[in-house]
Image (cartoon, grey):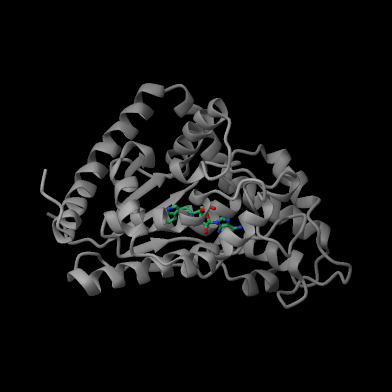
Amino acid sequence: MENKKRAFSGIQPTGCLTLGNYVGAVKSWLNMQEEFDCIFSVVDMHSITVRQDPAALRKRCMEFFCEYIACGLDPEKSILFFQSHVSQHAELAWILNCFTYMGELSRMTQFKEKSARHADNINAGLFTYPVLMAADILLYGAEIVPVGHDQKQHVELTRDIAERFNGVYGDVFVVPEPYIPPVGARIKSLQEPEKKMSKSDPNPNGYIWVLDEPDVIMKKIKRAVTDSDGEIAYREGKDGINNLLAIYGAMTDKTPQDAAKEFEGLGYGVFKERVGEAVAETLAPIRDKYNDLLKNKDYVESVYKNGAQKASAIAYKTLRKVHKKLGFIQR
Ligand code: TYM
């Protein structure tokens, strides 16, 4: 029917959707909607590697889904769905588990970090999480996976798993490429600019939520940790300023270096105000659209049900092919 290349990506419904997620992932997704055949999922199954309160998770899943649409993901152009609504993700993940080595999984940075943070709950799901992610991508034959820098390693593992499987059974899976945006692939915490901006940060001053009100955005940017040399320049050792320049650059489609030139000679106070304004301006229409969607629950439900149906039809075909190759009796 179409010859467009396919893109797949997803976000875990943990914490809240931050400016880091928006700049590192969602912004690329928006740019890809015309050119690619896009599939985007709220990957709820990934979020249970950490204990979740059921009521809070239910609310958050819906929040993330509405935020996808509010950010500009268009259900007429892209397939939008909840991962748990398409059972083939779990089915393929099991199969791929049998083609992934313990050694590979133990080298994953996110596993090392998360198991240190949740030392009392290092469950098998946390360990095999990247295999579920590989299943997400490979089920849809995605050629491109738009993600922030921290997910590059997982996409590389996906490539290794796909090539390994193809090596045994022939060309079953498309081997995907990560797409990492040139600006904003590593947005840092506003409070600890040497760490990434994380949606699970217990300190809300460290991140900007895409639905934050303009005055909250301004306050958080003004409180952002910088340095004491007073120079607006993009260079090593200036983590806080570099981060604000990357944020401003991502908001205005400039490189951080060009952004730095724009602010040359100005003080941090004025600079932060301009960054805050640029962020607030970008996020305002998202908040408005989100509030509209809250009044239109039937529409949202029709989008995710329809999305799951379409996703399932594609996933079913891939899984059927995989079963056949493995030697399972066809249903
Ligand atoms: P997650 O939910 O942690 O993050 C979602 C997306 O946001 C990007 N991101 C960032 N980009 C720039 N700066 C930051 N500070 C920042 N923080 C997060 C992430 O790189 C990611 O693109 N395992 C994935 C979710 C996933 C997935 C998939 C992604 C599951 N299956 C299949 C792609 C394809 C994750 O935990 O992302």
Task: Classify the position of the C terminus by image quarter.
Answer: top left
Q: Residue 273 at x, y = what percent?
A: 75, 53
Q: Which residue is painted at 25% across and 66% down in the image?
A: 174
Vertical arrangement, residue 41 with respect to residue 257, above or below: above
Q: Residue 247 at x, y = what percent?
A: 63, 60
Asked whether, in this view, residue 34 is left or right of residue 327, the answer is right
Q: Nearer the viewer, residue 317 or 181?
A: 317
Q: Residue 160 at x, y = what percent?
A: 36, 71
Q: Nearer the viewer, residue 148 or 328?
A: 328
Asked whether, in this view, residue 225 is left or right of residue 65, the answer is right
Q: Which residue is painted at 15% across and 61% down in the image?
A: 325
Vertical arrangement, residue 60 with respect to residue 1, above or below: above
Q: Which residue is painted at 30% across and 55% down in the image?
A: 95
- Residue 267 shows up from this direction: yes
Asked whether, in this view, residue 95 is left or right of residue 156, the answer is left
Q: Which residue is painted at 32% across and 40% down in the image?
A: 75
> Which residue appears farthest toward the bottom when viewing the image?
236
